[in-house]
Amino acid sequence: MVAHGPLEARVQVRVLVGQPRQGREEYISVLIFSGTAHEDLAKRIASFVGQNVGAVKISRYPDGEIMVKIIENIRGQDVFIVQPISYPPNENLMELLIMIDAARRASAARITAVLPFYGYARQDRKDQPRVPITAKLIANLLVAAGTNRLLTMDLHAQQIQGFFDIPVDHLYAAPVMLKYLRTLNLPDMSIVSPDAGGSKMASAYADIMNCGLAFVAKQRKGPSEVEAMDVVGDVEGRNAILVDDISTTAGTLIAAASILKDRGAKSVRAAVTHTLITEEGMEKLRQSSIEELVTTDSVPKKEWKGCPIKVLSVAELLGEALIRIHNNQSVTSLFRIE
């Protein structure tokens, strides 16, 4: 294990392995591995912890099947596997499951799946006949593969935590987002939820920022087409900040920004945790009234091609949570915003 400076005392600690037998304790170390979905973020997390990313070989058979081999000895170790279920979600999910299975069969003491972005979360309930609940399906697959604990951030729906019978540490990007938003020193700010589903997040932002709150009532025509309807709250002459957890086509944000401008908003910005915007979405964003979209590196960065996007890193947030999980410490303080 590689550790540096003051972090060494936090990483090289004595922890209980499973249920202690007759008072016996064992020393284990933390090992961080990464799939191919977001290696840059895994390296930044490992650097914060004071380690290097563990050696693992990931390749494909000629027919496309995934082959994984963990190079390092992980027997009795505390293993963290970093892999957002981002584009391409099917490939990244299968790669994650195979890595977890490999770690379990290599006798890791505990396996924590670190999912900065939990994919397939939009289908979290059966709101129509004959549709799946994919968020629950992913939970079942992760546990069946051998996951002992989940570390994730800004789930699309809070109730997804209840789909697991293993511990779930659910972080929020709000501390990182709000720290940046405060540096803008915008007067007359209003936090706006682009739809009813984001009202709780918007309310939390508004309370912390001690500013106005508004909501956009919308009607969705299809998976990629949204019609904004009305605004609840005063936005005239104010600097509006749209907050949301995920954006793929940017349709919701753009429609909301348009109606906010029509209602007299001085400026419109957006703060989105997970930005998976498509090429079509980027073109729409460039032509929209959104002055800046603030997001995180929970998923890999794209070539934004002139889009007004500011990317903030959540590596330190995830790294600190990883250290606390390993040391059996509380992660509650990570939710505090100063």
Image (cartoon, rainbow, N blue to C red):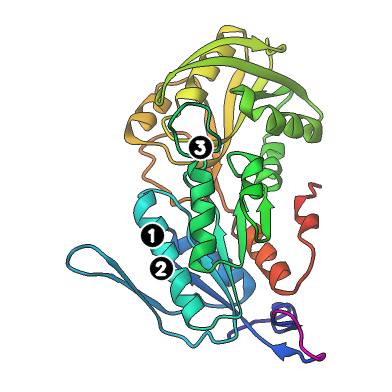
**28 is within the stretch colored magenta:** no
Name the residue nearer the viewer: 134 or 249.
134
Q: Are marks 1 and 2 in contact (CB under 8 Å)?
A: yes
Q: CA distance from mark 3 to mark 1?
A: 19 Å
Q: Is residue 8 above or below residue 325?
A: below
Which secondary structure lies at badge 3?
A: loop
Q: How many marks?
A: 3
Q: Which residue corresponds to mark 3?
A: 122
Residue type at numbered disc 3:
Arg
Q: Within 10 angstroms of label 2, few (less than 14), some, or many (20 or more) residues?
A: many
Q: Within 10 angstroms of label 3, few (less than 14), some, or many (20 or more) residues?
A: some
Q: Which residue corresponds to mark 1?
A: 94
First in sequence: mark 3 vs mark 1: 1
Which secondary structure lies at badge 1?
A: helix
Residue type at numbered disc 1:
Met
Please indicate, yes or no, whether residue 144 appears anywhere in the rendered image. yes
Q: Quadrant of residue 279?
A: top left
Residue 9's disc is: none
Q: Which residue corresponds to mark 2?
A: 98
Q: Residue at horizontal 48%, vertical 66%?
A: 145
Name the residue nearer the viewer: 207 or 289.
207
Which secondary structure lies at badge 2?
A: helix
Q: CA distance from mark 2 to mark 3?
A: 24 Å
Residue type at numbered disc 2:
Ile
Single out the residue that lies furthest toward the left. Answer: 62
Q: Magenta part of the protein: which range?
A: 18-23
Q: Is residue 252 above or below residue 73?
A: above
Q: Are marks 3 and 1 in contact (CB under 8 Å)?
A: no
Q: Quadrant of residue 201?
A: top right
**21 is within the stretch colored magenta:** yes
Q: Are marks 2 and 3 in contact (CB under 8 Å)?
A: no
